[in-house]
Amino acid sequence: MLRLRRPEGVQFAPGGTVETLQGTQTLGTTLLLNLVRSRQRINAWVSNSSSDDMPPLVVSLPLDELTKTIFPRRDALLADWQALGGASDVGDVWPAFWRVFWATLSEAQGDAPAAMPHRAAPQASPVATAAHPRAFRGTKFRPPKLALVELDLHAWMADDRLLDGFFARHDFTRWPVLGPDGQPSPADVGQVTPTVATLLARQDLSDDDLHLPLVFRRHFLWLLRTKPADDRIAWLSLWRAFGAPLKGELLAMLARLCALDTAAHKWAELALILPHTRQSLFLSRMLRRRSYKLPATYLNDGQLSAFDAISNDDASFDAFIDVALDNLNRGVNIAYTLIGCRLPSGSCSFKTSTRELTATSQCKEVPVMDIERMLTSVGDAGTHWARRVWQSCAEQPGFARILSETEWESLTNEAADRWLSVFYVSEWSFEVPAVRAAQWRVRLAMFPELQCQLLTLPRERQEKFVCMLYHYVSGWDDPVTLQRSWPVLVPLQARLCRPPFSARAAGEFGLSGMAVNLTAAGWQQLAVMPERSWLAIERACRRDNNATLIRYGLNGVTEALPDFALRSLTYVPKRLMRSMSLIGCLEYNARRRFLHQAASTPWFANKWAGMEAIDACQRILALCVEYGVDSPLPRRLREHLAGTVKLTMAQLARHCGITLARLPSTQLAALDAMVWRHIDGPFKLRTQSTAAHHAVRLHASIDGGNKKTLRRFLLGYAQGGVHTYLDHPLNREWYARHPRINAAVWGTNSVREPVGDGAIKIAIETDPMEILMLGSYVGSCLGLGGLCQYSTVACLVDANKQVAYARDATGRVVARQLLAIDERDRLVCFAVYPYTIDAALRLAFKQFDEALASALALDIYRDDDADGYEVKIIMAMEWWDDGQWHTVEDAPKG
């Protein structure tokens, strides 16, 4: 068995496969067992050992160099090897013999000496017999004669001991030794018979090298043949320090490291301080990350011992070392990474927390003591901040100041958590690095004033203030205007956190939603806005979904009609909130288009302040008739304009003043009329019921695939097709695939569950308009303005989904639960909302679910079902799976 010598100029890299040249196997397939193309590089896979369980080495060369270096040599060597296999006289293949000798190294197959090959006797000619009639004289056919094989050079060259025996029988006077250059070596003539060892020693090795252990000579010595003796001694000492492995993973990695860089033994020496099981982990990661190309002083024994000490198991040690060496390749020192590894990872998975340790920059001094103070302040729920702030110390210059100068001991857990959010500027928020850096500089400049205002507030009002700050800075994309606005708006936000305003955060979106579209003059108007205006916003935003709609509306109106928005907020704030909640129902692009068109109507295009009072009143009256809104003109003024009464100049002035004072409310009424024309125009449903009123607003608010589905339902409903969606072919197909489902039970309210004295009853809802209110009734994310409001459509139109309401004696919904049937005919019960219901009502829902499952003859999906559930989306395009409801004891408490 032979293995190829490394061609000159070839560099070794990690990865590969083991392959040798044996018997008559072609040299081409062994030299290039596998080619991996990657742009301009090719990995040629070459052996480094005869052991099957030993990882190999990879030769990596540029494509042009590989073509010039490997391929011609491969073809020539292949021809030489094939010539040796069929030689009958050594003289015919003597140059080829020495070319193969100098290009390969033999591998002994065991410690026992191999038998000397014998000459093969020529095959006897066939005898003419009855069994071989064609062999008789006179026939044209002659059996082919095999070539006379007198030499078995393949077998002799497979082992140095056999080759030494061949040399002992060879006549070197007639056929002298040929050197690597192909020229005869005159020193051999008449001298002692050469051996493989003496030839290699004279060519590459010293006498001392020939006495080294065989394993070391096989795996290291050839690579070190041109290196100083100190390097050979260093690698020999290292190999012995690792226990002188004879085979296996450890030997392979040491040999690979020696092949990659003979000066990298200092990196391997670091692993000696580790337990045996972690030595291979370190060497493997060091080879994979190619850290050996860096000075070994970048990682010291103390740091490596620290990684070993903080690792609970081999998996964590492997992950920590991997990320540390990965960071080191990007110029991040080990000390910085070690600090991050020591910090708690929070409740996220180990893989996710380790990914957070990847760094592109480093911080010279991380305030570890201040991070510990911060962690004490945020509590157990805020441990995820530890590695985030460690990363921010490097990526946001000056972030360490936030950690050290914040008075953490004065903050509540919730306020401390939100406080960090104010100053954490991630790439998810601002993708452009320049904008992200500018945002951070502005927030850092704001820090002293923000903390000053925060500490003046009672502890129970701190969370509200930092919530307002977070929405203020995170929703402001332009760092220049943010820099100009905060001296005016930060004191205003602190004012809104003191009495008479609520201590609970409500409407914190409103201020930032308006201010981002205003100029400096507009910010000043906000600062002097009366308390009743802000109280109106606060009361209207007590529910999160309503707050979202009002924020959308305020943001859109201040962008299109800033002066009108400020005037309305000053004089008619409650009326403004109703209109903003309606306008906020419009999807973003539709809202912008609508408000742009509204701004060009006479209601907002006219310069009312520049008109004569009586002319303005006449124009307002005409517009009210045109748009169908109530007139703000007093009765006496309308009669005067109609010519039935005559008013004095003083009376006209007073009545005109009243009319113009009412103008903002009238403009809002006109805006509402235009919105409703846009929302309800195709359906004409909003006056039928409160639920229909809600349904058309929901349609306007949804953006996505479910919008078309809801539109088709509403058009059909307006034409009298109340339950036509139940007969849709897709729903009928679902029932056909689930014959066990009794539609008379599943699609009706035949199953009822009384609660307590019977004042509250639970039943499946059959009114489609009421079904669409399942989120709005309880204020969940499926409600109008909620994040998942689109999912309400699927709960209505899909035959495998139903909603159960708990209603009191007046018909008011007090709780609801979404139910579904999965593909394995099991009843899946989702969470009951709101979370604040009492235990008795939760128990009643559990009993209702069991009664419904019994009536349907279905099992209820349980937590311990290992196969999970699959609830199909039938007619809808998308649906939010809220998660299976736990048992009564484990149900959310609020």
Image (spheres, grey):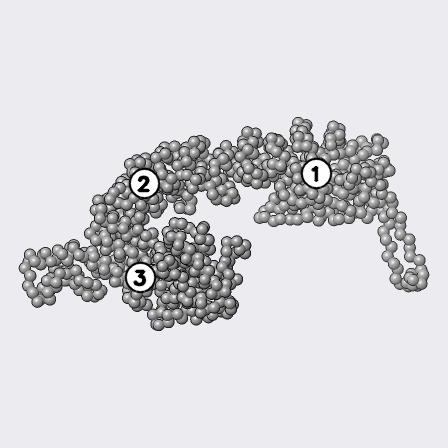
| Residue 517, visible in the rendered structure | no
Residue 743 position within the rendered picture, expressed as x and y whole percent measured from the top left: 45, 69
Q: Is residue 564 above or below residue 721?
A: above
Question: Which quarter of the picture shows residue 840?
Answer: bottom left
Residue designated by label 3:
810
Q: Is residue 530 above or below residue 262?
A: below
Q: Residue at x 32, y 35 (%)?
A: 448
Tag 1 and tag 3, C-beta contact below 8 Å: no
Residue 575 position within the rendered picture, expressed as x and y whole percent measured from the top left: 23, 55
Residue designated by label 2:
460
Q: Is residue 510 above or below residue 275?
A: below
Residue designated by label 1:
247
- Provide the secondary structure element on which disc 2 rests: helix
How far is the residue under mark 1 from the one under mark 3?
83 Å
Q: Residue at x 78, y 33 (%)?
A: 197
- Provide the secondary structure element on which disc 3 rests: loop
Residue 593 position within the rendered picture, expressed as x and y whole percent measured from the top left: 31, 59
Residue 439 position within the rendered picture, expressed as x and y whole percent measured from the top left: 36, 42
- Left or right: 889 as drawn, with respect to 626: right
- Comparing 138 with 655, the one in front is 655
| Residue 159, visible in the rendered structure | yes
How far is the residue under mark 2 from the one under mark 3?
38 Å
Quadrant position of the N terminus in the picture: top right
Circle 1: residue type: Lys
- Left or right: 486 as drawn, with respect to 3: left
- Left or right: 713 as drawn, with respect to 176: left
- Comparing 375 with 324, the one in front is 375
How far is the residue under mark 1 from the one under mark 2?
68 Å
- Comparing 29 with 644, the one in front is 644
Q: Residue at x 34, y 70 (%)?
A: 718
Circle 3: residue type: Thr
